[in-house]
Amino acid sequence: MVRVPRATPHQVMAAAGQARPADPDSPYRLLAGWVDTGRPADLAAHQRRHGPLPVPAYPGRAGPHRLIGVVDRSGLRGRGGAGFPTGRKLTAVAAGRRRPIVLANGCEGEPASRKDHVLLSVAPHLVLDGAILAAYAVGAEEAVVCLHAQDPLADTLRAAIAARSGDPVPLRVAEVPDRYVASEASALVNFLNTGDPRPTAKPPRPFERGVRGRPTLVDNVETLAHLAMVARYGPEWFRRLGGPDSPGTTLVTVTGAVRLPGVYEVPLGTSIGQVLELAGGAAEELQAVLVGGYGGSWLPLPSGGGIRLTHADLQAAGASLGVAALVVLPARGCGLAETARVLRYLAGESAAQCGPCMFGLPAIAADLTAVVEGAAGRRGGAVLDRLGGRLEVIRGRGACAHPDGAVRLASSALRVFGTDVRRHLSGRPCPWAAGGPRLPVPGDAAPGAR
Amino acid sequence: MSRPAAGRRGGDARLGVNPITCRAHGLCAELLPELIGLDEWGYPILAASPVPPQLLEMARDAVAACPTLALRLSGAR
Ligand SMILES: Cc1cc2nc3c(=O)[nH]c(=O)nc-3n(C[C@H](O)[C@H](O)[C@H](O)COP(=O)(O)O)c2cc1C
Ligand code: SF4
Ligand code: SF4
């Protein structure tokens, strides 16, 4: 637990980024209030800690542009999976001719992730501040918080919005169908425009032509919460934690074979092993960790424990940060069986619009299932070759990145669990292949499933 | 982003397909086998390289022949 001194008043901000957080060196930024009080921050608590919305710090006609510059210099990158530089996206949206729209993506369709849920539960006003500030920066006429339909958070956010006053841009909540691909950026736009929650082909990208034909900024809710802090405390403060290519802190969801599964906030650059320690350490002997969610990559343990959570380090290790979810597979688990099950889930979540996705994902799921079950018999090697070929052919050929995630997952499984592949093919699967699922998918009865 | 220098004629012309409107008719691959293959499900796999000038006319024909207007040629002059 960190001790946070009594919050200092922030009423007056002479210049942008001049306010100081209560504890500038704390590793808890987004979760500081929660760690400190154990209570979700209502508007009063939020403003005691962070001060009012810092729009007055960016006055005049040049103010929005200056705010974009501050975000750009902070080096903030999107927390929704792709890690795109937030300042660049703001610039692109602001460059459009028509008044933009801002979408705060809080759907968190990723089954391995709970961080957006936790953030929206404990610090809703930080996210709303970020949505308003982003809207102010790009000159948007509206900011929409996108959440899954039937998610109790929708009521939480509606109440939070009702409690606010004086925001320069109207805020509202939109409820989106609870499907994996419905929260992809172009699918959100399509849903708000037509009621169809499926992705659309690019171009045009949402920043070019999105909701009601307007340039549309789609940002993850955690990205926006960081933005709300960058606008107050400035880029230098933001860069005090994290690395040059991946500054700041990140929320990370840790599940699987650790003693204290949950959502943690860590500086980017923290090693995987350190994060697992934070989550109580190994609950039993470990085998591998899935990094970046169900469209992410497997890394072996313990050897992968030294890899740091930065975009560059993970890329060098053949993985990617994705949504910063770690699923820890114990030694007594079958990575291939888990992967095959998740692939079947991902195949079922295809929006069934693009051939390589709607036919390709079931095909690779079936191939890997055949390998796991040893069903291919002596033809096993041929199935494996076919799977490898299909993984090559599918990548990059959908209208959205959904199939690419499935390909990344499957390819990394073949790499990391290569010994198991040979065992399964020779009819000697590990004893754990038939065991209970370690990676829950929606619809499972397993505890911990959404 | 850096782009390859444009050749004399259509040097950075590139084929693209809208994977949502493509109906796997396969006509494009018949008309332009030099640059378009088909996957096992009948969907086109496009060459990543620019369309060479001598194939530009055929590429235009393939685009025009696509029954769903899924095939595009961009950057061609
Ligand atoms: C299949 C699929 C599902 C996605 N689901 C989410 C999601 O639930 N939440 C989210 O923030 N981004 C999601 N994304 C990423 C969004 O398309 C978009 O890149 C992101 O919201 C941008 O925010 P950022 O720049 O702040 O990361 C998804 C992408 C894909 C391909
Ligand atoms: S790639 Fe798959 S999920 Fe994405 S739009 Fe095409 S069919 Fe839908
Ligand atoms: S001709 Fe058009 S619809 Fe047919 S495969 Fe080619 S791109 Fe797809």
Image (spheres, coloured by chain):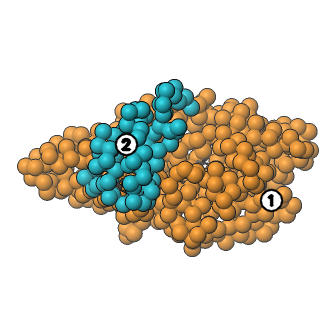
Chain colours: A orange, B cyan
User: Where does residue B15 sit, x and y in percent of width and height?
Assistant: 43, 43
- Of all chains, the one bearing label 2 is B
Name the residue: 37% across, 42% down: B58
Residue at the limit of the structure toward the bottom, as seen here: A150
Label 1 near ligand 1 (CB < 8 Å):
no
A18 vs A274, nearest the viewer = A18
Whole-Å distance between the Cαs marked 1 and 2? 52 Å
In the rendered image, which quarter is residue A361 located in?
Answer: bottom left
Name the residue: 39% across, 69% down: A443
A288 vs A67, nearest the viewer = A67
Disc 2, SS:
helix
A390 vs A225, nearest the viewer = A390
Q: Residue B58 carries which label?
A: 2
Label 2 near ligand 3 (CB < 8 Å):
no
Residue A351 seen in this snapshot: yes
User: Where does residue A169 sit, x and y in percent of width and height?
Assistant: 80, 59
A398 to A307, vertically: above or below: below
The residue tagged 1 is A169
Disc 1, SS:
loop
- Of all chains, the one bearing label 1 is A
**Viewer-nearest of labels 1 and 2?**
2
In the rendered image, which quarter is residue A355 located in?
Answer: bottom left
Same-chain check, marks 1 and 2: no
Left or right: B23 in relation to A171: left
